[in-house]
Image (cartoon, rainbow, N blue to C red):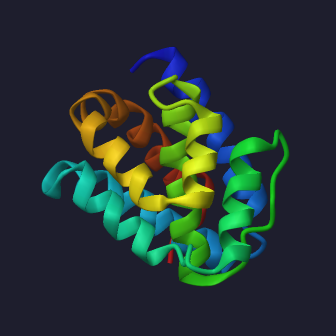
Amino acid sequence: MSYDDYELALKAFEKVINSLPNEETKKKFRSRARDMVEEIYTSGFIPTFFYIVSKAGLEDNNKMDKLIMLLSSPTSVDLGRGDEASYMAYLFIILYYLSERGIVDTKVLIDKLRCNRLEVINMLYELSPIISARIKRYLLAVKRLAEAMIEGR
């Protein structure tokens, strides 16, 4: 595994852990980290991405604002509690990789998330072969971090 993927996974994981306020939500995130990486390689990146977006509760503008703040800020943001927060945290993990690796420009991503999520999906659909080829090591590192650092059920 590339050292850069480890380093990026550590940074993203730290932001997520600091953004999840209680242990139950952290456990739910651990479950997402364990399941979603496998789902991406079973069902494909785009269908899994659609699923994660649908579960993250982004139709709520407050939740969308929290996700955007987490992407654009060097500090953590309280993502809330429950399933939606755990999916939002995993969505952040994916979007953070895409922006930090220069696959998608952060400013463009934030603008499209705020204004038209369908454009984000179209953009990622076009890039999905590149994303699928590059993101696996990073997501596996996040999975291992979650397994090591968050107590299971």
Image label count: 0
Q: Is residue 50 above or below residue 22?
A: above
Towards the viewer: 26 or 19: 19
Report the residue that reaches farthest toward the right.
75
**Residue placed at 55% from the left, 50% from the top?**
112
Judge whether 80 appears above or below 75 on screen: below
Residue 51 coordinates in the image, percent (x, y): 33, 69
Residue 41: x and y, percent?
19, 48
Left/right placement of residue 37 relative to residue 108 reads left
Residue drawn 56% across and 33% down? Answer: 99
Q: 90 and 57: which one is in front?
A: 57
The residue sitting at the top extreme is 3
Q: Quadrant of the N terminus?
A: top left
User: On the image, which quarter does residue 22 sit in?
Assistant: bottom right
Q: Position of residue 9 (x, y in %)?
A: 56, 35
Residue drawn at (44%, 67%) of the image:
53
Q: Nearer the viewer, residue 125 or 143?
A: 125
Q: Residue at x 85, y 46 (%)?
A: 75
- Residue 130 in the image: above or below residue 72: above
Instruction: Give the image location of residue 142, x and y in percent.
Output: 50, 44
119 versus 52 height, above or below? above
